[in-house]
Amino acid sequence: MAESPAQSYTERILADVQEVAAHSSNGRLPMPDLAEWDIFPFEGEMRVKELSEPSFPEPAREGEAGAASCSSCQREDKDFIWTNDNWRLKSDAPSGLPATVMLTPRVHCDLADLPIELATEMGPLFLQIEAALLGLGGIARVHINRWGDGGAHLHWWFIARPEGLTELMGSCSSMWLDVLPPRPQDEWYDTMRRVARAMTEAD
């Protein structure tokens, strides 16, 4: 049976990893340069994890079987801080940063099959959400991320980074979400009310 392109690519990566690790002092890949950056959240002795054997086919994502199996589709509008005819914005719990929100389409789809009419709405919506978060005050940047490995329903993360904490700059900001103590519940409620009001006023 012919090898699939994915299998071939994965096997080449694993072979390269094994070759590099075999010539290292601890049998592992070296730590990346990122570990020396000021924004890296951790310090002390660390090592790169060993890669597991590849899994073909990959495990199904949540909602992969369709809307009936999708927790995002089953949620009611009252669970979201802002909605319109095609999109919903939520924040389920406080994080360690001033504000983190997630944008999802109402229709069950991922980015690859997002209807073109919704795709044309994303750009203006991104600007609207960023403006709402920057409008909180004390926000230096809004990071926008999309990871699609956990759920099959398209979801975009918007992470508000506070001014002054330069260690929180850049790509490690999402790791700090799970490291920093969460904001107090009443502060989070107030922040989400302000974001919802800004979104509604911009409609």
Image (cartoon, helix red, strand yellow):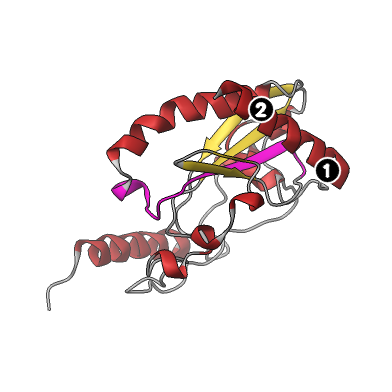
Residue 133 numbered tag: 2
Question: Can you give x and y, in whole percent of width and height, for residue 187 in the image?
Answer: 85, 38
Q: Looking at this view, is 147 or 164 the one in front?
A: 147
Q: Is residue 190 magenta?
A: no
Question: Can you give x and y, in whole percent of width and height, for residue 73 in the image?
Answer: 49, 59
Distance (Cα) linking label 2 and label 1: 16 Å
The quadrant of the image that shows the C terminus is: top right
Q: Looking at this view, is 185 or 81 the one in front?
A: 81
Question: Can you give x and y, in whole percent of width and height, for residue 52 in the image?
Answer: 46, 72
Residue at x-position 77% and y-position 43%? 96
Quadrant of the image occupied by residue 3: bottom left
- Mark 2 neighbour density, 10 Å: few (under 14) some (14–19) many (20 or more): many
> Taking 152 as reference, is 55 above or below it?
below
Amino acid found under the numbered disc labelled 1 = Arg
Mark 1 — residue? 183
Question: Can you give x and y, in whole percent of width and height, for residue 11 in the image?
Answer: 30, 66
> Taking 67 as reference, is 31 above or below it?
above
Q: Specify which label sits upstream in the sequence, 2 or 1.
A: 2
The magenta-colored residue range is 96-113
- In the image: residue 198, left or right of residue 126: right
Quadrant of the image occupied by residue 124: top left
Residue at x-position 52% and y-position 58%? 72
The quadrant of the image that shows the N terminus is: bottom left
Amino acid found under the numbered disc labelled 2 = Leu
> Taking 25 as reference, is 185 above or below it?
above
Q: Secondary structure at mark 2?
A: helix
